[in-house]
Every structure is written in C-alpha cells, then in structure tokens.
Image (cartoon, rainbow, N blue to C red):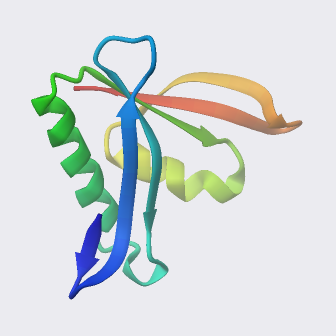
C-alpha cells in the first residue's frame, strides 16, 4: 500500500504464478486520481520488484487490454521496462486483444 498522511493513495496486488518456478503475476495496481503522475505507481512497482528479487523471483507477468482506454496503462508499464511478450487477438471481445507483458528480474 501507499499512503500520504495516513490516507491510502495506492495499492498493488501480486503473487506467485501457480505451477511455475519463481514467476509472479502482478494482478492489480491502482492509485487515487489525485496522485496520478506523482510517482505512486512507480514506487509501488519498484517495491514489488525489490520484494520479488529478495524472494529470488525471475519473471513478472502482467495482463492488460489493447483498447485505447488502456493506452496510458501500457505506457506506464513500458516506462517501468515491461515488454509485450504475447497478444491474443479478440480475447476480451472482438477488437479488444489481451496483451501479456513481462519483465525479467
């Protein structure tokens, strides 16, 4: 969690990927609208990556949408050095691909 003056402003949820060795999924990351662009998300991801390095994690996987609305999300992950590993066309609905991003630790 991230807080400012005792107020929750962001959180991240991640865990081990079942049936893998040292691979983790980043399930959710969220920040309050009033702190977007202020480094809260980057701090949460950096903290997660540090935790996973201490746990000998080697790969982080993120799933996201290809729609225009998720463009800023994809840009955020790109800035954190996550790259597109795979794409499943029309996964969520026709015209909305599933994009799988990864980062090796």
* Residue 2, quarter of the rendered image: bottom left
Closer to us: 96 or 3: 3
* Residue 25, quarter of the rendered image: top left
Q: What percent of the width, then of the height, locates residue 63?
A: 55, 36
Closer to us: 84 or 56: 56
> Looking at the image, which residue sits at the far bottom?
5
> Looking at the image, which residue sits at the far right?
94
The residue at 43%/84% (across/down) is 34
- Left or right, residue 100 beside residue 46: right
The residue at 52%/54% (across/down) is 73
Closer to us: 57 or 104: 57
Viewport quadrant of the N terminus: bottom left
For the question of whether residue 39 can be seen, the reply is no
Q: What percent of the width, then of the height, locates residue 66?
A: 68, 42
* Residue 69 versus residue 20 in the image, above or below: below
* Residue 104 versus residue 52 in the image, above or below: above
Q: What percent of the width, then of the height, locates residue 42?
A: 28, 57
| Numbered disc total | 0
The residue at 59%/41% (across/down) is 64
Q: What percent of the width, then of the height, locates residue 28?
A: 48, 50
* Residue 64 versus residue 4 in the image, above or below: above
> Looking at the image, which residue sits at the far left?
54
Viewport quadrant of the C terminus: top left
The residue at 26%/76% (across/down) is 3
For the question of whether residue 55 can be seen, the reply is yes
* Residue 57 versus residue 12 in the image, above or below: above
């Amino acid at each position: 969690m991230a807080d400012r003056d005792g107020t929750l402003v962001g959180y991240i949820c991640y865990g081990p990927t079942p049936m893998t060795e040292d691979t983790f999924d980043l399930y959710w990351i969220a920040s309050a609208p009033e702190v977007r662009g202020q480094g809260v998300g980057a701090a949460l991801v950096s903290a997660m990556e540090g935790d996973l390095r201490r746990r000998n994690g080697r790969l982080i996987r993120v799933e996201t949408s290809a729609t225009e609305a998720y463009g800023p999300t994809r840009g955020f992950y790109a800035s954190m050095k996550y790259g597109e590993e795979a794409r499943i066309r029309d996964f969520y609905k026709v015209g909305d691909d599933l994009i799988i991003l990864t980062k090796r630790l």
